[in-house]
Amino acid sequence: MFPMMNTKRTRSRRGANGFTLMELLIVISIMLILMLIAIPNFNKMRATANETSAINSLQAIYKAEIQYQTTYPSNGFACSLAALGGDPKAGNPSPTSAQLVQGDLSSGVKAGYIFSIVNCTKVTVNNTDQITGFDVTAVPQAVGKTGNRGFCMDQYSEIKSDPSGGTNCTQSIQ
């Protein structure tokens, strides 16, 4: 008689404890392809969000201008963002620091856009200059990256856009 043979066979399991190099390379290449598709869409979404923020900021500036004109009627409108801004810790509001807009907006830069109050028109009443009109501009810091269109608004709150990202605003915002 033959000695009893071990009937259990030992099988070698190749790759039982992990992935093969080929499988890892395939997964990484699929991830790279998905990233290449997603990044341009992400940049477009960010530019659109910045444009929406710019329009909302123009509306906030307009409301602050109306409140400034009501609070300081002898001055009329403010002709600078600094006059609409100001730090509440520095004391009471004044015509040069009305504390009507947030600090980031009064600095002139917010959400990838640069804001300016320009084209101020004034009249002199009792030897005091009174601002009777203004335009506010919002242009992207980097056209095509932080935003695609420039925006303009006047003292009548009409917002128009410049498709090239500048201040030649001719198209009405719907």
Image: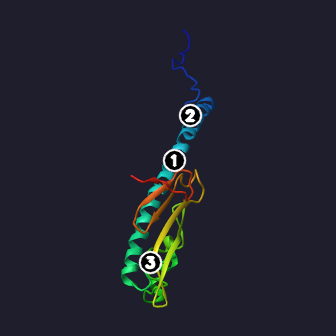
> Which residue in the structure is indicated by mark 3?
77
Residue contact between numbered discs 2 and 1, judged by CB atoms under 8 Å: no
Number of callouts in the render?
3
Q: Which mark is residue 157?
A: none
- Residue at position x 55%, y 30% from top? 16
Question: Does dot 2 land on a helix, a strand or a loop?
Answer: helix
- Residue at position x 60%, y 31% from top? 20
- The picture places residue 25, in percent across and down from the top left corner, at 62, 33
In the image, residue 70 above or below residue 10: below
Amino acid at pointer 2 = Ile
Amino acid at pointer 3 = Phe
- Residue at position x 44%, y 56% from top? 52
> Which residue in the structure is indicated by mark 1?
44
Q: Nearer the viewer, residue 27 or 115?
A: 115
Q: Nearer the viewer, residue 138 or 29?
A: 138
Any part of residue 137 in sight = yes
In the image, residue 24 above or below residue 107: above
Any part of residue 85 in sight = no
